[in-house]
Image (cartoon, helix red, strand yellow):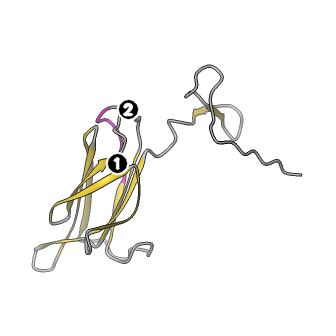
Amino acid sequence: MASILKVDALQGVTAAGDITITSEGGAATQSLQQGLTKAFLSFDFGSNTIPDSFNITSVTDRATGCLYGSFTNSMNNTGYAVPSANSPVAEGSMATNNNNRYCISSGDTTGRFSQNNMQVTTSSDYQNVPYCCATINGDLA
């Protein structure tokens, strides 16, 4: 018979925010807080809307394919990771041809990140990529 654990909050024994999880093989441990995504963003350049997000208060469309994502809760420092991607097709669909597209992301400040998503056309013009996404990994302030 399976057990079900229902709680509203988890606290570590040594320190409230210190929860450690044992690996599948039992030989290593991982801090729960370190392994969580701290923010994510799905952005639609076509309509300048946010179909889905977590810990993102707003997006500023800076220029063709360029945005700032502002955090609801700031990061501890600017050394956080911003894995990102762009897609030429509708959100949730598989991208098929990314030969002329690029995505560059960085942690600018503790309060926001930047992302540049563009595609180069056959006439060497830059255009918005219709959809982009990013996850933020690191320590919250």
Among all residues in the image, which is located at the extreme right? 1
- Choose the circle earlier in sequence order: 1 or 2: 1
Q: In the image, residue 78 lies at what x, y percent?
A: 28, 36
Disc 1 from disc 2: Cα separation? 16 Å
Quadrant of the image for the C terminus? top left
Q: In the image, residue 123 lies at what x, y percent?
A: 10, 79
Numbered label tally: 2
The label on residue 141 is 2
Q: Which residues are magenta?
A: 77-83
Q: In the image, residue 28 lies at what x, y percent?
A: 64, 31
| Mark nearer the viewer, 1 or 2 | 2
From the viewer's perspective, is residue 87 above or below residue 107? Answer: below
17 inside magenta stretch: no
Amino acid type, mark 2? Ala
Q: In the image, residue 37 lies at what x, y percent?
A: 46, 46
Among all residues in the image, which is located at the extreme front? 8
Q: Is residue 100 left or right of residue 93?
A: left
How packed is label 2: few (under 14 Cα within 10 Å), some, or many (20 or more)?
A: few
| Residue located beneath label 1 in the image | 82
From the viewer's perspective, is residue 53 above or below residue 9? Answer: below
82 inside magenta stretch: yes
Which one is in front, 58 or 99? Answer: 58
Q: Residue at x 36, y 43 (%)?
A: 81
Amino acid type, mark 1? Val
Q: Residue at x 62, y 30 (%)?
A: 11
Among all residues in the image, which is located at the extreme bottom? 122
Q: Is residue 56 left or right of residue 129?
A: right
How packed is label 1: few (under 14 Cα within 10 Å), some, or many (20 or more)?
A: many
Which one is in front, 76 or 134? Answer: 76
Tell me the element at label 2. Answer: loop
Which of the 4 image quarters holds residue 14?
Answer: top right
